[in-house]
Image (cartoon, grey):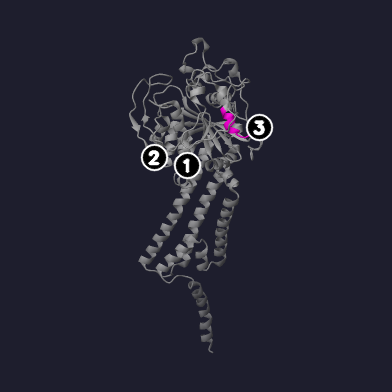
Amino acid sequence: MSRSTRAAGRRAAPRAGRSRARSHRARTASKAIGLTLVSALVPGSGLLMGGRKKLGAFVLTISIGLLLVGAYVGLTHRDSVLALAVSPRQLLIATGAVVILGVCWIWVVVASHKLIRPVTMTYTGRLAGSMFVGLLCFAIAVPTTVAAQTVMAQRDLIGSVFQSEGNSKSATRPNVTNTKDPWEKVPRLNLLLLGADDGAGRTGVRTDTVIVASIDTKTGNTSLISLSRNWMRMPFPANSPLHKVYPDGYWDPSKGNVEQPEYYLDSMYDNVPKAHPGILGQTDNEGADVVKLAASAALGLDISYYMQVNLAGFRQIIDALGGINVNVNYRVPIGGDYGTGPGTNGHHLPSGYIEPGPNKHLDGYHALWFARGRYGLSDPSRQERQRCTIHALVNSASPQALVTSYQEIAKAGKQLLRTDIPQEILPAFISLALKVKSAKVTNIDLNKDKNFPTGKNPDYAAMQQIIQKSLNPVAGTPTAKPTRKPTTGTTKKPTPPKTTATPGTAQNLSDACAYNPNETGTGN
């Protein structure tokens, strides 16, 4: 073999090596586009096909590892996920992680396409490949941005609504020593739900909706107890400074045994703090603490926390969820005012009505009036509609609705909620809420005809007896004691009927909220 032939062979060797490197590339632009799509769906595969074996194997291993770890944590460590979802610090870290993963994913797609595409391409093929890669990057960037915005919206919501124990003040909130299991020694958790009406044209804030939710912390079974807005003589616990001011309950004895609208339950939130500012000590919401103390004494329950709902935010959150479905058994007025009582705008007729019908879909505006409407209707019917609205709202909060509308929900939630629930126990609260969603929800009928035919002098002791019998149907240790000995009662365990409740019994809300066109809403 001549020297020139051997030299030519040596020069050919490197070209053969480069040829092997080029063999990893797609031969056509269309095939390169297909392989780029595969590299986007399976990060790391494109790098492997492009000849970057070590880097591709590393990216592929990381991708599969993240998927497996995410699935494992989501399925077996739900509490950890919930804790992350309510921790502002961890949510900030999660936002950064989402952005970094999105950027890395886009880089992998672009790098894979550069390695896979043919060396020589027509202008059309190069343009098509670039456009497809740009489309893939856009498809990755959009959900990444939405995910980051959603996590930040959650962080903003948590920081705005829920404060830590050290950064908030409450005159009635219990001290929590075990934040991981705050219900360890709490068989029933009692929450005060307030619907605050501070709309345009009203002076002050009225709590037209006052409901106590008593939750079994083991099962999630929940009993709802509605308090009438026109109750007078609301008592205070004996150890409260307000008991010294109102020893016979919240009313003015000098006016005699007559209706006193300025001493109704719905006026306490605004009037008591104005009349006795700072009487309870340091608190971020004195009105809520006042109502919480009064409701505790009136019902004989130890109420731990409150959740105050602003009605404007309530409308927005229902719209964000896509509306709710309720059974409308009778015409419900939209607007209307009797022209008497605190916060009135003068007498005027309703502007319209929500017509009866089964399983009616209501947007936020009509759902708000379904819960609030009272012109020509009785207070008990209004309370029942409020409970049914809560029931429908819980049932409407599906994972699909939460995922697709969460930013709108979080924005509305900042205006909707005010509470003294501390950040430290939010994971435990979310776990309890998941139990409630799948558990039984009942209504405790306090027997209006017997115990509060008017608002002047409710029989709170008799109501306490009904509540204790409903919450403790089997002999055992009661969760709370009545303030005085009950005067009447029965020994039979109440049996809830399907559609109408016997006064003084517990009724399943699914039955109470069923369609019954024979109801009138007037109490007749």
| Mark sitting earlier along the chain (1/2) | 2
Of badges 1 and 3, nearer the viewer stands 3
Mark 1 residue type: Asn
| Mark sitting earlier along the chain (2/3) | 2
Q: Residues within 10 Å of mark 2 (few under 14, many from 20)?
A: some
- Of all residues shown, which one is farthest toward the bottom? 1
In the image, the segment drawn in magenta is 466-477
Q: Quadrant of the N terminus?
A: bottom right
Mark 2 residue type: Pro
Mark 2 touches mark 3? (CB < 8 Å): no
Q: Residues within 10 Å of mark 3 (few under 14, many from 20)?
A: few
Q: Is residue 278 left or right of residue 106?
A: right
Say which of 229 and 308 sits in front. 229
What residue is shown with label 1?
A: 395
Mark 1 touches mark 3? (CB < 8 Å): no
Gap in angstroms between the C-alphas marked 2 and 3: 41 Å
Say which of 484 and 120 sits in front. 484
Q: Is residue 171 magenta?
A: no
Q: Residues within 10 Å of mark 1 (few under 14, many from 20)?
A: few
Residue 48's place in the image compared with 466, above or below, is below
Q: Position of residue 281 (x, y in %)?
A: 60, 22
What residue is shown with label 3?
A: 477
Secondary structure at numbered mark 2: strand
Gap in angstroms between the C-alphas marked 1 and 3: 32 Å
Residue 240, numbered circle: none
Secondary structure at numbered mark 3: loop
Of badges 1 and 2, nearer the viewer stands 2
Which residue is depicted at the point 39% across and 69% down? 121
What residue is shown with label 2?
A: 358
Q: Position of residue 32 (x, y in %)?
A: 43, 67
Mark 3 residue type: Thr
